[in-house]
């Protein structure tokens, strides 16, 4: 593996080891995202099914909401970290776009149409969020007596607001992730010049 000569001697064992370790980090964390997402949806489905079977309290639907939120945030943190490592490698070891180590430059040039690849699984998470809310409405309707409609509306409103907050957070996070490469490339360029 050749390291770009502008960032150091290709015979530098420490630099070569750093490059290899960081590429391994990207590979491992990239794979971990799929595992985290699979575990998140399995746990969410299990909790949601269990709650539907054993309770009639609509606010308990917040438990699977927390499972979904935690899974999304973990997936986001892994994705953001992988991208950050990639930008560091790009600047430290790929200063010459023609160098043997050119993966990160190639990734930056790749133009994938929006919606084709969803690195955060946003559509799947939002679909699960919507289903989670529908189940909350179903539970509320199933247990509400005609004289308790006001209480059901208040409880449903709280659940709806919390689901909307989560959806807004995920959309904001996806927007951040879409612009992360270019923004952090600029930030790393400034930091590495110091």
Image: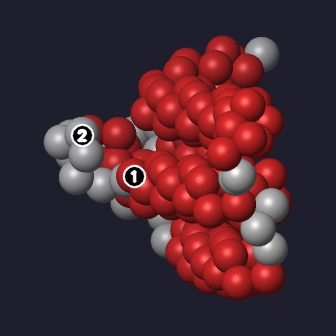
Camera-nearest residue between 175 and 87: 175
Q: What residue lies at 80% left-to-right and 52% top-to-bottom? A: 59
Residue that mark 1 sits on: 123
> For residue 108, which numbered disc appears in the image?
none
Q: Position of residue 149 (x, y in %)?
A: 69, 38
Instruction: Note whether residue 47 is visible.
Output: no
Residue that mark 2 sits on: 114
Instruction: Single out the mark in the foreground, 1 or 2.
Output: 1
Mark 1 secondary-structure assignment: helix
Q: What residue lies at 24% left-to-right and 40% top-to-bottom? A: 114
Mark 2 secondary-structure assignment: loop
Q: Height in image: 169 above or below 33?
A: above
Instruction: Note whether residue 170 is visible.
Output: yes
For the residues labelled 1 and 2, the Cα–Cα distance comes to 12 Å
Could you tell whether 2 is left or right of 145 in the image?
Answer: left
> Which of pointers 1 and 2 lies earlier in the amino acid sequence?
2
Camera-nearest residue between 191 and 173: 173
Q: What residue lies at 70% left-to-right and 60% top-to-bottom? A: 143
Q: Position of residue 69 (x, y in %)?
A: 71, 52
């Amino acid at each position: 593996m050749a390291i770009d000569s502008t960032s150091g001697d290709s015979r530098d064992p420490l630099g070569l080891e750093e490059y290899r370790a960081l590429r391994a980090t990207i590979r491992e964390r990239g794979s971990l995202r799929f595992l985290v997402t699979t575990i998140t949806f399995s746990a969410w489905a299990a909790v949601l099914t269990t709650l539907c079977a054993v309770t009639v309290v609509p606010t308990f639907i917040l438990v699977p909401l927390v499972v979904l939120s935690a899974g999304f945030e973990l997936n986001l943190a892994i994705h953001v970290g992988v991208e950050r490592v990639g930008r560091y490698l790009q600047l430290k070891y790929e200063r010459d776009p023609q160098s043997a180590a050119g993966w990160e430059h190639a990734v930056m040039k790749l133009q994938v149409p929006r919606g084709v690849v969803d690195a955060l699984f946003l559509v799947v998470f939002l679909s699960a969020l919507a289903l989670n809310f529908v189940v909350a409405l179903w539970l509320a309707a199933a247990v509400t007596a005609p004289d308790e409609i006001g209480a059901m509306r208040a409880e449903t409103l709280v659940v709806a607001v919390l689901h909307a907050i989560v959806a807004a957070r995920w959309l904001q996070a996806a927007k951040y992730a879409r612009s992360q490469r270019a923004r952090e490339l600029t930030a790393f360029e400034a930091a590495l010049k110091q």
